[in-house]
Amino acid sequence: MLDSKVLPIDAFSRETFASVYIEIMNARNFRIGFGTGFIAKFGGDFYLITARHVLLGASGNEIIELENSKSEFINTNCHIIGRNGSNFYLENRSILLDLYDRSRNRNWRQMFDWDIAVVDITDKVSGEGLVPVAIDLSEVAIQADADGKPISVCADDDLPVVGSDVFIVGYPGNLEYITGNRAPIWKRASIASEPHLALDNRPIFLIDTQGASGLSGSPVLFNGPTLVSPSGQRRACDYEKQKFRLVGIYCGREGYAPDAISLSMGRVFKLSAIQNTIMEARDA
């Protein structure tokens, strides 16, 4: 495993170590699936976010009923920022998460048929004054009344324009030495469909890239200069907190073909869908 504790934080992009390798284990502690997830911060809480089909041990194009899933645990990791005198370093910590409670209620959050799963890991990673490496999703739109009093919170709908380059940061299963070292690859893609148009009645846009098994659940990052709202308003990206901006989660290849090489389109659920999954579950 990569010994990041001996290397300074400034040697890396922090978004690299927010992306984590996920193994899905059954009751006998055998691996039945794998994929990618990422650690995210929303407000003061921390979450592991991945594709829902990854937790169920299914492929991106496979329909699986919850009761037929044999998955029981998530085996993953989290990078903690440590300090040695005036130097900061990364400490890699293993995390084992139960997918169900004793009453067989799921421990993750989901909405509708969206391929998004959110697991609250705040208690696992934020004790002892520790700071996990995470992608901050706290930026949302706040609506106010005529007196300026906040009345509701809405997800962030601003996205890059079609044709923009983005990066999928994850763990393709055909590169075993990558997953063994717990360091993801950055795979370039381009936005292939108008991102503000819903596809299949879901908050999805397509990207043009050659996918691979294991990338599902990866964060999709953008570092261009401009974002566009659904109404057409443009605003400059603010990279003060982190170098790259999360715009969605990669959830598998789109379409069907006799061989994987023919599948060059991928599905991305938008940032707003991730935020709405977190906020809806909070209010429930």
Image: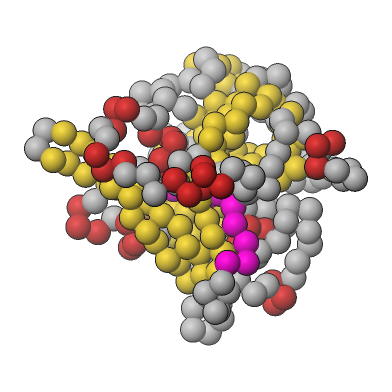
Q: Is residue 250 left or right of residue 8?
A: right
Query: Can residue 32 be found in the magenta stretch?
Result: yes
Q: Residue furthest left?
A: 85
Which of these two is toward me, 39 or 150?
39
Q: Is residue 250 left or right of residue 150?
A: right
Q: Main secondary structure of the magenta part?
A: strand
Q: Position of residue 135 (x, y in %)?
A: 43, 39
Q: Residue at x 47, y 54 (%)?
A: 48
Q: Residue 162, located in which quarter of the rendered image? A: top right
Q: How is the image coloured?
A: secondary structure
Magenta segment: 31-40
Which of these two is toward me, 13 or 203?
13
Tally of numbered tags: 0
Q: Position of residue 51 (x, y in %)?
A: 62, 53
Residue 231 in view here: no
57 versus 256 height, above or below = below
Q: Residue furthest right?
A: 258
Residue 60 in view here: yes
Which of these two is toward me, 149 or 215?
215
Q: Residue at x 20, y 36 (%)?
A: 88
Query: Can residue 242 be found in the magenta stretch?
Result: no
Q: Position of residue 273 (x, y in %)?
A: 61, 45
Q: Is residue 162 left or right of residue 75?
A: right
Q: Residue at x 32, y 44 (%)?
A: 3
Q: Is residue 88 left or right of residue 251?
A: left
Q: Residue at x 31, y 41 (%)?
A: 4
Q: Position of residue 152 (x, y in %)?
A: 50, 45
Q: Residue furthest front?
A: 177
